Image (tube, rainbow, N blue to C red):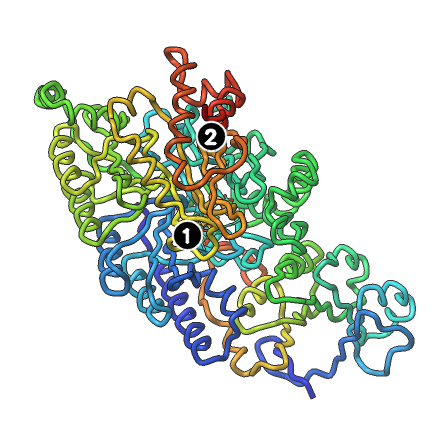
Amino acid sequence: MPKLIKDNQIIDDNWIVVDADFEGALPEQPAIVPLSYWNQNKASLSARSDIGVWLDSHEEPSHIASDLDSIPVVAINFPKFADGRGYSYARLLRERFNYKGEIRAVGDVLQDQLFYMKRCGFNAFAVRADRDIEVALTGLNVFSNSYQAACDRNTPLFRRR
Amino acid sequence: MYKYDDYDRNLVLERVKQFRGQTERFLAGDLSEDEFLALRLQNGLYIQRLAPMFRVAIPYGMLSSVQLRNLADLSRTYDKGYVHFTTRQNVQFNWPELKNIPDMLESLHKVEMHAIQTSGNCIRNTTTDQFAGVFKDEVTDPRPYCEIIRQWSTFHPEFAYLPRKFKIAVNACPTEDRAAMKVHDIGLELVKNEHGETGFRVFVGGGLGRTPLLGSAINEFLPELDLLTYLEAIVRVYNQHGRRDNKFKARIKILVKALTPEVFAQKVEEEWQHIKDSAAKLTVEEINRVKGFFVEPSYEDITSSTEFEEQLASNKAFANWVNRNTNEHKIPGYSIVTLTLKKTGIPPGDVSDDKLELIADLADKYSFGEVRIAHDQNIVLADVKQSDLFAVWRKAQTAGFATPNLNMLTDIICCPGGDFCALANAKSIPIAEQIQRRFDNLDYLYDLGEIELNISGCMNACGHHHVGNIGILGVDKKGQEFYQVSLGGCSGKDASIGKILGPSFAREEMADIVEKIIDVYVENRTAEELFLDTYRRIGMTPFKERVYAKAH
Ligand code: HEM
Ligand code: SF4
C-alpha cells in the first residue's frame, strides 16, 4: 500500500486519487476526486464520508468554499514542485475558510518543500513515489523557528521576541 | 547596523546545515539538476559559463568592516582574490567551487551574512538609498523598514515558489530616488501624511528585462503598521494570478498591466481586508526595536575647520574629488564619501581582496566601521569628518577608488556580460572600457555634467540599460556581437524607460557613437540643462540624424 506522511508520521494511504479525466462510477473505496467530478456529482458524493476533492494548481479553493463541511480531505496538486500556487491555496483554506480537515499535498511533492508546505497548512504529504519517504520526513523540521506568522503559528516572531 | 539575536543566528545556521545537506544530496546524485536548481538558486548559486557564481546578500547595502574582511578572506580562500559588487546591492563570487559553498556559507554566518534568496523565484534582497540615514532631505531612515521586510521575506513559506523573482526597493527621499523604486516589482516610498504620520506610497509592477515597465502607484498612503500585511496581500495576489505558462510574462508587471493598476489594487485591497488586523500586523514596539539598531553614531560637535578650506583652495585635484565624489551630510562638519569603483581598466564593481581590506581600514578609521554598497556599483563611506577627507582622499587615490567621476559619463553601470555570464549576447566590460578611455578628460566630463550610461550584455538588463540616460544593450546578430543604443532612460524621481535610437552598431564603433550623441547634446543644450533635459526637450531626431548620417 502507498505511504503517506500525515500529522508528522508515516502511515498507509488507503485513499485513491482519481484522475482529472475520470468518468463513470467511483469504486467503493475512499477517493479523492477532481474538482470537475465533484461539481458534477456533488449531490451523491457529499452523502459519503470518504470522498475528498483535489484542486489542480489553477483551481482556487473558493470553488469549494461552501462545500468544505462535507469534504474530509482537500488535496492540492503540484504539477511541478516549482508551481507555488498551492501554498497560497492551503493558507486560504485554513485561514480564510477555516477548514479543519486534511490538506494533502499531491503531485511533485519533495522533501525540500515540506517545511514550507506544513507552515502553509498542509498536514499530509504524498511524497513523490520515487523518493524515500523516511528521508523526506526529516524535511518537516529543518527550521526550529520562523519570522512570519503562518498556519503553524499565527503570531510572527516579532510578537514573541 | 542591525545585529542578529539568537533567533536570527539560529535561523541562518539552520539554513547552512540545510544547504550543506542539499549540496551533498546533489553531489551524491539524490537530487536531480532541476530540483537542485530551484534550491541552489534560493541560495544565490548559479552555474555559469566558467564556474558557479555565488551571490551573497548585503541587506539594503549595509556592510561592516568585519564583514568586508570576511568577504576578502573568502575571495582569497575560495575564489580568485576578488569580488564583484552588483546593481542589486549584493556581492558575487565568480569562481567558487560547488563543494566549497557550504563552508563559505558557514563562514558568512559567523559575520551575520548569508546568501538566502539572492536569486530564484522568491522575494530577493530589499534595497534602498545608499545615503539612507545620513541624507538631510529624507523623510525618515528607510533601513529599519528594509530590515523588517528582510525578516518577513526570509523563508516566507508561501512565497518561495513565485512565478518569477520578486524585488522590493524602499526610498525615503522626496527629492531624489537613488533606490530606483519604480523599476522594482514593489517600490515603497516613505511619506508623511497631513497628520505627520509615517506611511508608504506603494508602487507595483516596475521592472526591466525583456519588457521594461515603470511601477504604478496603487496606494497613496499605507500606514506603517500595515506594511507587512499589505505586502503579503500583494504577493499573494501575484502568486495566485501571475502567469506561469510563459517565463517571459511571469513577472508581476505583466499581471498589473493586464489587469490595469486599478483592478490590481482592488484585488489587493480585497485580500488585505481579510488579514490587515491579524497578528501579522506590525507593532509600534517592533518598529521601535528595529529602529534602535539604526541610531546615529556618536558624531562629534564640529566647528568649521579652516584647514579643510585651505586644503580645498590649494589642491585642485582634491577639490575636484570633494566636489564630485562627496555629498552633503545631514550633520555639519561631516561628508558622505563615495569610493568609485570605475577606474578605467577595472571592470565596474570588481574589488580585489587587499582593496576590500583597505576599505575596511578606511571604514574603521574614518566612518564608524561601516560602508554601503550603491546600486550604481560604488562603495560609500557615509560618515566622514571633513577634516579627515584629505587623508581619505589620499588613501583612496592610491588604491584607485578616487576617480572623481561619480554620476559622470564614465561612472558606468555595467553587467559582467560575455566575459563571465552564460546568458550574454555580447561582452559589455570592453565597451565600458572603450568609452572610459575616450572620455578621459576630467574637465570635459565635468562640463558635460551628470549623465548616466548603463550597459547590459543581454535583454535581462542586469546593467539597467533601459534606465540609463544612454543605454547600451548587447545583441546577437547571426552569431556576431552588436550593440543597440537607447536614449532618455532614467531611474530617479522622474523615471523613464529609454527609447531605442535605431539599428545596432559594431563593437569598435561604440565610443564614436557615444561621442556623436554627446556632441548633439553639447550643441543643443542651454546653460542649465543636463543631458536628459536636453534629450527630453529636443527629442530623438537630432541624435538619430547625427549618428546615422552618411559619411561624405
Ligand atoms: C553573471 C551572472 C548573472 C546571471 C546569470 C544573471 C542572470 C540574470 C537574469 C536571468 C536576469 C533576468 C531576469 C528577468 O527576466 O527579469 C537578470 C536580471 C538582472 N540582474 Fe542579473 N545576472 C548575473 C549577474 C548580474 C550582475 C553582476 C548584476 C549587477 C551588476 C545583476 C543584476 C541584475 C539586475 C539589476 C537585473 C534586472 C532586473 C529587473 O529589474 O528586471 N545580475 N539577471
Ligand atoms: S544582462 Fe545578460 S549578460 Fe549581463 S549579467 Fe545579466 S544576464 Fe548576464
Placement of A88 over or under A102, stated as above or below: above
Say left or right for B405 vs B424.
left
Write down the quadrant of residue A25 in the picture. Answer: bottom right
Q: Earlier in the sequence, mark 1 or mark 2?
A: 1
Mark 2 closeness class: few <14, some 14–19, many ≥20 residues within 10 Å: many
Q: Is residue B425 visible?
A: yes
> Residue B136 in the image: x percent, y percent?
32, 25
For disc 1, the chain is B
Categorize mark 1 by other alpha carbons within 10 Å: few (<14), some (14-19), many (20+).
many
Query: Is label 1 on the same chain as label 2?
Result: yes
Q: Position of residue B276 (x, y in %)?
A: 60, 44
For the residues labelled 1 and 2, the Cα–Cα distance comes to 25 Å
Q: Residue at x 86, y 69 (%)?
A: A46
Label 2 resides on the chain identified as B
Spot occupied by residue B454 in the image (x, y as percentages of width and height): 41, 37
Which residue ends up furthest to the front in the rendered image? B552
Q: Residue at x 68, y 50 (%)?
A: B241
Q: Which quarter of the image is occupied by the C terminus of chain B?
A: top left
| Mark 2 residue type | Cys
| Quadrant in the rendering for residue B5 | bottom left
Seen at 63% across and 48% down, the residue is B249
Give the structural element (helix, strand or loop) at label 1: helix
Q: To which residue does mark 1 refer?
A: B418
Measured as percent of width and height from the top left, residue A126 is found at 65, 76
Residue carrying label 2: B490
Does the Cβ of the disc 1 residue fall within 8 Å of ligand 2?
Answer: yes
Residue at x 65%, y 37% (from the top left corner):
B265
Position of the N terminus of chain B, as image quadrant, is top left
Say which amino acid is labelled 1: Gly
- Name above or below for residue B460 compared with residue B263: below
Disc 2 residue: CB within 8 Å of ligand 1: no
Side of B262 relative to B149 (left or right): right
